[in-house]
Image (cartoon, rainbow, N blue to C red):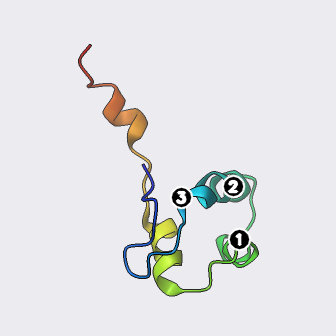
């Protein structure tokens, strides 16, 4: 799960995750996508670049 806010500057970033993933999977450069989304600070950019979405992997081990 993507954090709701950047850890360093507290800017909301979670709402940008889906669009970022869709556009980078289509082949756009990550730099251009982040510029278009308005992410100018290094801390916010690093948060998106370094995030690995593991929710599907963790959900396999959930007990019912």
Q: What's the residue at 53%, 76% (across, down)?
A: 45
In the image, which disc is placed on residue 37? 1
> From what the image shows, is residue 47 above or below residue 41?
above
Q: Position of residue 62 (x, y in %)?
A: 27, 24
Distance CA(mark 2)–CA(mark 3): 10 Å
Tell me the distance, in whole angstroms, between the alpha carbons under discs 1 and 2. Answer: 9 Å
In x, y percent, where is residue 61? 26, 25
Q: Is residue 53 above or below residue 31?
A: above
- In-front residue for pair 54/10: 10
- Please tell me the numbered disc located at residue 19: 2
Seen from this angle, which residue lies furthest top?
64
* Residue at 66% in and 73% down: 34
Which residue is outermost to the bottom? 41
Gap between marks 3 and 1, in whole Å? 12 Å
Disc 1 or 2, which lies upstream in sequence? 2
Q: Is residue 36 left or right of residue 55?
A: right
Identify the image quadrant of the C terminus: top left
- Say whether marks 1 and 2 touch (CB < 8 Å): yes
State the mark number for residue 14: 3
Q: Is residue 60 above or below residue 54?
A: above
Q: Quadrant of residue 36?
A: bottom right
Residue 32: x and y in percent read 73, 76
């Amino acid at each position: 799960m993507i954090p709701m806010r950047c850890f360093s500057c507290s800017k909301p970033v979670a709402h940008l995750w889906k669009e970022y993933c869709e556009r980078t999977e289509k082949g756009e450069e990550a730099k251009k996508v982040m510029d278009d989304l308005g992410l100018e600070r290094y801390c916010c950019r690093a948060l998106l670049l370094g995030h690995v979405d593991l929710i599907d992997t963790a959900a396999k081990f959930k007990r019912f």
